[in-house]
Amino acid sequence: MIDYAHSCAISDGRAGNVRQADALAAALAEGDHARCLLAPRAPWRWLAPRRLPGSQFAFGDDFGRLLAAPPALAVGCGRQAALATRLLRAHGVATVQILDPRIDPAHWDLVVAPLHDDLSGANVITTLGSLNPVDDAWLAGARARFAAPGSLPGPRTALLLGGGSAHARFDRAAFEAMATMLDAALARDGGSVLATASRRTPVDVCDALRERYRDTPGLAWRDEADGPNPYPGLLGWADRIACSPDSVNMISEACATHAPVFVFDPGRVHGRPRRFLDALLARGRIRAMDATLAPFDVEPLRETARVAAEIRNRL
C-alpha cells in the first residue's frame, strides 16, 4: 500500500506546473505534502525527460536530497519534472506524471494528460482541461480571505484576462470588443465588475482595464502595485465569469466554480487549446461570450478529485 501522506509535488517552478502538481499531490495526501522545485542543469535540461549519464545530478541539491530519502509517491508536472519522476521511479517511488511527456508513458506508473494532448495508453488518465485546487472548500476559503467583493452589487461579473499566445491572439482590440459586450450587460443588469489581469496581459490592455471600469462598482487588479492578486476571491464571489480565450489553466479554474463561464471569441483559438474549448462547448460548461451574458445551469468541472480517486484505484 502506498502511504499517500508521504507524497511530493515536483515541478520546475513555472506557475502552471506548480499549481497542477500541488493540486494533485494535495488531493492524494488529503492535506500537506512535500514540494521539490527543480534547478535544471545543462545538458540534462535540454533533453529531459530523456536520461543521460549522470542524470542524478541534473537538478541540484534539493533533488539530490530527495533521491537520498525518497517519498512514497512523486507527482510531477512538466518536462523537467518528467525526468525527475523517472529517476525517482528507479528508486522504487510510485510516480504520476502530469502532461504529455513526449516519450512512452510506460516510463511512469501513471500519466495524467488533458484530452487535447491526444495521448493514450494503458496507464494514461485523460482529463478535460488542467488540474487545479478549486473546490467548494477552496472557494469558501477564498471568500474569507478576500471578503470585500462580497459587499459589491450583483450580478458580480469576474473578468479574467490573459494575453496573446501561440494559439490565440488577445490584444487591445480584443479587449475592447470584450469590454463592449460586458458594457451592454452592465447597462441592462447593473452589478459590478471584478477584473484581474495576468503576467501575460499586455501593458496597454492593463491601462485600458483601469480606465474602462474606473467609475464602475468593483475592482480592477493589474499587477502587484495594486496589492495582493484577488483572483481567488473573484472566483469565489463571481455570479458569472467572462474569460479571454487564451489560457487552458484559467478557463479550467473558472469552470471549477458554480458560475456560468463565457469565453470571448473561441473561434480565434487554434491548435490543441481549440479542442479543449470545443469539448467544453459541447458539454455545455462554457458559452461564447455575447452581450447578453444570459445565465445557464452549470455543473462544476472538478477533475482533480476525479483523477485522485482513479489514481488510488489504479495504484
Image (cartoon, rainbow, N blue to C red):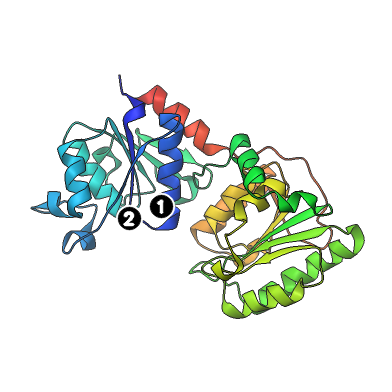
Q: Position of residue 120 (x, y in %)?
A: 39, 41
Relative placement, left or right, of 70 versus 239 is left
Q: Position of residue 19 (x, y in %)?
A: 45, 49
Q: Are marks 1 and 2 in contact (CB under 8 Å)?
A: yes
Depth check, front residue: 100 or 258:
258
**Farthest bottom residue in view:** 204
Relative placement, left or right, of 310 versus 82 is right
For disc 1, the marked residue is: 17
Depth check, front residue: 83 or 102:
83
Q: In the figure, 212 relative to 131: above or below?
A: below
Q: Position of residue 61 (x, y in %)?
A: 18, 51
Which three-letter amino acid code belongs to the residue tagged 2? Asp
Relative placement, left or right, of 48 versus 158 is left
Q: In the rendered structure, which disc, 1 or 2, sits on the residue that comes first in sequence?
A: 2
The image quadrant of residue 202 is: bottom right
Depth check, front residue: 25 or 295:
25
Residue at horizontal 75 percent and vertical 70 percent from the top: 179
Which three-letter amino acid code belongs to the residue tagged 1? Asn
For disc 2, the marked residue is: 12
Identify the image quadrant of the C terminus.
top left
Could you tell me which secondary element the residue under label 1 belongs to?
helix
Residue at horizontal 21 percent and vertical 39 percent from the top: 88
Relative placement, left or right, of 23 versus 53 is right
Identify the image quadrant of the N terminus.
top left
Residue at horizontal 40 percent and vertical 25 percent from the top: 312
Q: Position of residue 220 (x, y in %)?
A: 69, 66
